[in-house]
Image: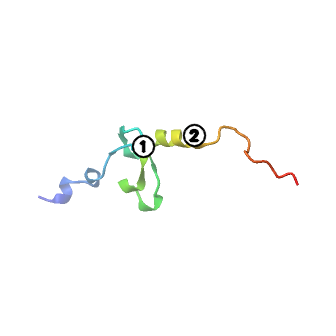
Amino acid sequence: MNLDDEFNLEHLLFKQRKCRSCGETKDLLTDYYLIRKDRGKYPSSYSYECKQCTKKRISNKRKNGRTAEWEYPDW
């Protein structure tokens, strides 16, 4: 019995991850951003926040079309 024939690399890698923000379990490869491109396709290369939660967080943190709060000093 050969161990290489029994197991593939896919069996050892995580296929799903639980999002830290929303708590839902989603597919790792399609629903999470790859944040460390130099490390390949390992699970540690992906973020712990899903794409939808990341988009919500970024859009909520942006200024909503407001003008600058300070003005150029009038000397």
Say if residue 42 shows up in the picture: no
Q: Position of residue 38 (x, y in %)?
A: 46, 62
Disc 2 marks which residue? Answer: 59
Q: Say left or right for 24 vs 55.
A: left
Separation (CA) of disc 2 from disc 1: 21 Å
Disc 1 marks which residue? Answer: 30
Question: Crowding near pointer 2: few (<14 within 10 Å), some, many (20+)?
Answer: few
Helix, strand or loop under label 1: helix
Q: How many marks?
A: 2
| Label 2 vs 1, first from the N-terminus | 1
Q: Amino acid at mark 1?
A: Thr
Q: Amino acid at mark 2?
A: Ser
Residue drawn where x is 58% and y is 43% of the image? 61
Residue at the front extreme of this rendering = 75
Q: Above or below — where is 40 with respect to 68?
A: below
- State the residue in front, 27 or 22: 22
Q: Above or below — where is 37 with respect to 56?
A: below
Helix, strand or loop under label 2: helix
